Every structure is written in structure tokens, then in C-alpha cells.
Image: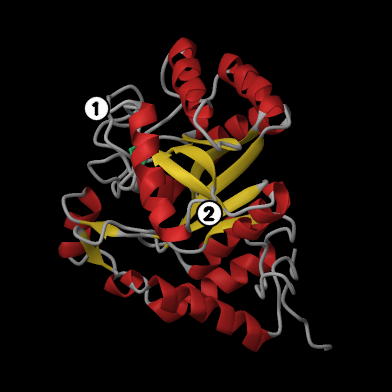
Amino acid sequence: MPVILPDPCTNKRYNAQSSYLKKRFGKKTVKISLNGGFTCPNIDGTKGAGGCIYCSSKGSGDFGGNPIKSISEQFGEVKEKLMNKWGSDLLCIPYFQANTNTYAPLERLKKLYSEALSQENVVGLAVSTRPDCITEETADYLAELSKQTYLTVELGLQTIHDETARLINRCHTYSDFLHGYEMLEKRGINVCVHIINGLPFETREMMLETARELGRLRPHAVKIHLLHIIRGTALAEMFERGEFAEMDMESYIETVCDQLELLHPETLIERLTGDGDKETLIAPLWSRDKKSVLNGIDKELRRRNTVQGIRN
Ligand code: SF4
């Protein structure tokens, strides 16, 4: 087999979103995490109670801003921190991250999204939500918005396996996901799908089946997360009772490389591991060393002489 070389611009063997944004907008482009003060139908009792068993008290938006502050204030604070890190010449994509960011009347969504879009140096918008929280009305509005800006709707899938979805209390099925996904796709809206590796009792083959299915769907982008066991969650109680084991780093790296091979080559890769809150993380503690995980993935792809999409 001939030697397969990485992308000459990024030196990566996968289609990294960061370089796509740089090519598209001509500058370093960063996401600004915001908290719009939403709740979640899986927390307020509409779909379920207690939330997904891994969900932190911040609605899985540990890096979102403080919802007491306005969107403009949150935006300014996060942007300043990022400017200290990356320099002042940045473009921004406000990212509604915490909880379910389409779960409110349309007028409220319009107000919050417009405030975010009106900030300086903004070139897009990202909205994270559940697939069962997209109505026809919301989808029509998002379609309008995506004609005006680079919009990505981030849908939590986590797994295609309904038995796991039940165990983790997602309170939606894979077929519910497809319904929400198709409402967005048919309107030409970019979708980023989130999946989680290491969910209790999932085998490697099950995780690959989830990736294979995404390879078939060809979403605009994918985020691959590692399951983080966070203090105070139902998942942490299960873990402390010894009901399941955390994923080890080697298996995680191998699984991610297999998944990259199964995805479509043009799907953007937004994330290859999770960013848990270090203070409350119980396990896997190796995930704190994100650089080693990412380097491990690069090394394994190089060892295999492979690239994203080779088995799509
Ligand atoms: S859907 Fe998201 S915000 Fe809602 S309970 Fe699950 S992880 Fe938490």
C-alpha cells in the first residue's frame, strides 16, 4: 500500500474544523461559549426527570458563561480570555452550549441569537440542542438564519443504540434523532452530531456502529467525546458501585481512529475528546492530559498509514 500523507496544511489525518474555519474566514476563528439560561426537557420533567445520567449540574455546559449576565457581557468576558491566549486578531462564533438551546418560545430564541450575532467580529453561530427539540417552526427560522451566517446546529446523539440511550436516560430514541436531523438537513442547515465513547456496557463494535451510521449520514461535523464521570451525577454513583469500568486511554485512541476511518472524509472533526470540568472529574483521570490523547490519535493514524474516511 502506498504511504498516505497527512493534509499538508494541518499535518493532520482528519478534517480538522479549526483549519476549515481558518480557510473559510481567513483568520483564526474561535467559539465563544455562552449560557442563554435555557433548561432541558429531560430535566424539567417534560421528557424525563433527572437528566442524562452523566449530565453535570451546569447542563453539560461547564464552560458556558453565567446566565445571570447578558449575552453581550458573557461574550465580552470569554472573548477577552481567548484574546489573551490567541492574540487580538480573532473572529468569533458565539456558541449556545449549556442545556437545550432551542427549548424556548421562538421569540426568545430570536432575541438571544440576534444579540449574539450583533457582537463585534462574529462570523457565525452555533446552537447546541436535543434532536427532539426541533419543531418545524424552529427549523424554518434556523434555515433563514443559516442563509445569513455560518450556522451550525449541534445535535446530541451520543449513541445509535436505544438500549444504551435508555440506560443513560436520554429520553429519546435513535429514530427521534433521525427525525430532528432530517428536519435540519432537508433545509440545508449544517449539523454537528455529538457522540460519546465509553458509555456503560457499550462494546467497541457498538461505538463503531454509531460511527458507521454517521458515515452514512455525512453530517457537516462531528464531535467525539469521551464519557466523563463527574462528581454528583447518577453515573458517578453507578461507577462508585463498580457497575461499569471507565474506558482506558489505549482503547479510546484505537476506537477513535477506527471511527475516523468510518466517517465521510468531508465531515469536519470538531472534537476528538471531551473537556470535563477538572475539579469535579472522577474518571478517567488520564483524560486531563488532552495533549497526550490527541498526540496518541495522530500517532496511531500514522502507524496505520490511514486517514479519515478510508473505510467510508
Ligand atoms: S440533554 Fe443535555 S442538558 Fe439535557 S439532561 Fe441530557 S446532557 Fe443534560
| Residue kind at label 1, given as amino acid type | Ile
Looking at the image, residue 289 sits to the left or right of residue 152; the answer is: left
Where is residue 66? Give x, y as percent.
27, 35
Mark drawn on residue 77: none
Where is residue 50? Give x, y as percent.
24, 36
State whether residue 258 is above or below residue 187.
below
Query: Which secondary structure lies at badge 1?
Result: loop
To which residue does mark 1 refer? 68
State whether residue 181 is above or below residue 218.
above
To which residue does mark 2 refer? 223
Tell which residue pokes out farthest to the right in this image. Answer: 2
Q: Nearer the viewer, residue 50 or 17?
A: 17
Q: Nearer the viewer, residue 77 or 193?
A: 77
| Residue kind at label 2, given as amino acid type | Lys
Please say whether residue 257 is visible from this viewpoint.
yes
Task: Look at 49% across and 24% down and name the residue there.
Answer: 113
Task: Look at 58% across and 54% down and name the residue there.
Answer: 28
Task: Look at 30% across and 47% down and name the residue there.
Answer: 62
Please say whether residue 218 is visible from this viewpoint.
no
In front: label 2 or label 1? 1
Crowdedness near tag 2: few (<14), some (14–19) or many (≥20) residues, C-alpha within 10 Å:
many
State whether residue 208 is above or below residue 38.
below
Where is residue 269? Give x, y as percent.
60, 58
Looking at the image, residue 68 sits to the left or right of residue 180; the answer is: left
Image quarter hosting the N terminus: bottom right
Sequence-first tag of 2 and 1: 1
Where is residue 38? Give x, y as percent.
34, 26
Q: Are marks 2 and 1 in contact (CB under 8 Å)?
A: no
Image quarter hosting the C terminus: bottom right
